[in-house]
Image (cartoon, rainbow, N blue to C red):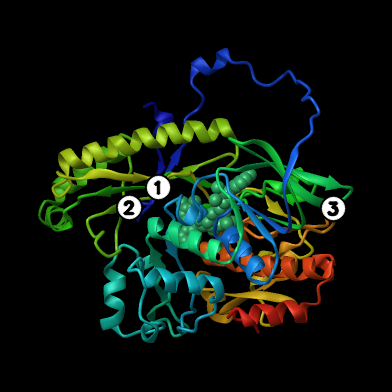
Amino acid sequence: MGSQDKLRYHGPAGMARYNIPEAPESDKRFTPGIKTIQETARDINVISEADVIVVGGGPGGFAAAVAAARTGARTVLLERFGHLGGMMTGGLVNIIPHLSDTDGKQWISGICEELMTRLDKQDAAFRPLPEDWGSTDPVVTKYYKDSSFHHFFIRRNKNGEECLVYSVIIDPEIGKNEINRMVMEAGVKLYLHSLVTDVVMECDTVKGIIFESKSGRQAVLGKVVIDCTGDGDLIPRSGTAYEDNIDYGLRIKHLCFGFWIGGVDFRAYDKFVSSRQKDFIALKNELYDKGLYLSFFRGMLKNQEDTAWLHPHFIANSQTDVEEMTRMDVSARERAVRTWELLRDKAPGFEKSYIKLTCPQLGTTGGLRLIGEASMRTEDLKRHEPFEDTVAIFPNNDRGQDSVDYPVVYVSFRTLLPKKTEGLLVACRAFSSDDEANSCFNLVPHCICFGQAAGTAAALAAARGISVRDLPYSDLKGALLAQNVILP
Ligand SMILES: Cc1cc2nc3c(=O)[nH]c(=O)nc-3n(C[C@H](O)[C@H](O)[C@H](O)COP(=O)(O)OP(=O)(O)OC[C@H]3O[C@@H](n4cnc5c(N)ncnc54)[C@H](O)[C@@H]3O)c2cc1C
């Protein structure tokens, strides 16, 4: 590896950021796209006509589809991969944080809580007991504080004491199946292995989508389309305004290659770390010098305590550039194998380990963001009053003194609503926001909330034959409260 491949920095917590290699010399043989060709016009089969079309089956998408179908809409959900859950399952981002504030009051419920409970019943979720949420009792907090996931469970409350917040770690494999069940039970028409490539427009109104699969190029028409692609694929395709600036230091600037190493004997590893400090430091330095991965979480899921979880982050120019994504994937996988080999050979406890799983889909954190009727700007995070169209309330646990002064953040429905385009909602991490606010509230539970609100609104509007823009908030609020969403 060249110097370019080395770590960008080695932070105090070992949270390194890696660089994506430049294109190899051999790529220069292929000239960049200077030519264009014209696609031949053709007829496309319309295989479904629906009330609500949801594109992308991640946290936002599965929730939008379930909410729309439960509200009575004929709902189609399209997902490019063979599983649902997006980053939460396929990206191995299975930590669902901040469902309560630091006092232990739960703010995120609805479909998110339903999924957590369904997984818990199958021993596929790790979460603290409700009576412990907000606890400052050291006997309670110690277990979480000592775990490698302490960052997701422990916060300081308004008195400066360490306390436990309600967060959950889920099994992504059982998660994929449970999300399928929820979608199928709701009566959603599901298309997996289906990449949505375009929108059907009539002036400024989205009328449907076009997708590609092994069955060819097909179309679905609908009354409301919800973009839950995470990356906001339908936003530019429908001519909807967006912003895509991301400050270099923010987490949403990263791509990630999550993978799991199984068969680790952590007792032997801990003994090595405590009794052979010099060798341990030498090992870390060797990993560092070779540009390999330095840190890991320890699995907390039942029967998976022998698993190390690695989430190496790579700084990306764009999160949707296929060439950059390819270079990153190849380089990250090579480093994953080399990291495991080095640990196996030199770290006691890893002798019998093996690579158990690499993320089926690349971890994508940011991307472009809708410019909506309203936008969550950093200054909006300091607000005591709810918006008149609040559709979700998020615990504000991560913002130091601001979290003390403003313990929750209110989400306006208009952050999911484009300014001009009709027939479209955006209910995923591409919600209308500036990069800093996005970096705080682009998380799994938050995107589930966006999806639940958008799916419900789309179904209500479709049933009445009106634009989602014209849906009275009182009706949407009533429907969301009936689904156990917590609102002002
Ligand atoms: C490395 C990393 C660490 C993170 N850590 C955490 C964490 O600890 N806790 C947390 O809560 N959040 C975390 N996040 C953020 C979290 O993953 C996202 O906020 C969340 O997954 C966003 O959900 P989404 O539905 O908007 O998008 P996604 O999860 O990206 O889902 C989008 C779905 O749409 C599909 N799709 C995309 N384009 C198309 C298309 N054109 N046609 C059909 N289907 C399409 C995708 O395949 C995917 O299934 C992390 C993210 C990363 C990458």
Q: Horizontal placement of 178 versus 458: left or right? A: left
Residue found 66% across the figure and 82% down from its top: 384
Measured as percent of width and height from the top left, residue 206 is found at 80, 51
Q: Horizontal placement of 224 versus 400: left or right? A: right
**How would you rate the neighbour count of disc 2 (Cα within 10 Å): few for under 14, some for 14-19, many for 20 or more?**
some
| Tag 2 secondary structure | strand
Query: Could you tell which of marks 3 and 2 lies nearer the N-terminus?
Result: 3
Give the residue type at disc 3. Thr
Give the residue pinned by disc 3.
Answer: 205
| Tag 3 secondary structure | strand
Q: Up-down: is 43 above or below 314?
A: above
Quadrant that contains the C terminus:
bottom right
Give the residue pinned by disc 1.
Answer: 258
Give the residue pinned by disc 2.
Answer: 309
Between residues 441 and 128, which one lies in front from this camera angle? 128
CB of residue at label 1: within 8 Å of ligand 1? yes
The nearer-to-camera label among 3 and 2 is: 3
Q: Quadrant of residue 177?
A: bottom left
Give the residue type at disc 2. Trp
Query: Could you tell which of marks 1 and 3 lies nearer the N-terminus?
Result: 3
Query: Could you tell which of marks 1 and 2 lies nearer the N-terminus?
Result: 1
Measured as percent of width and height from the top left, residue 173 is found at 39, 55
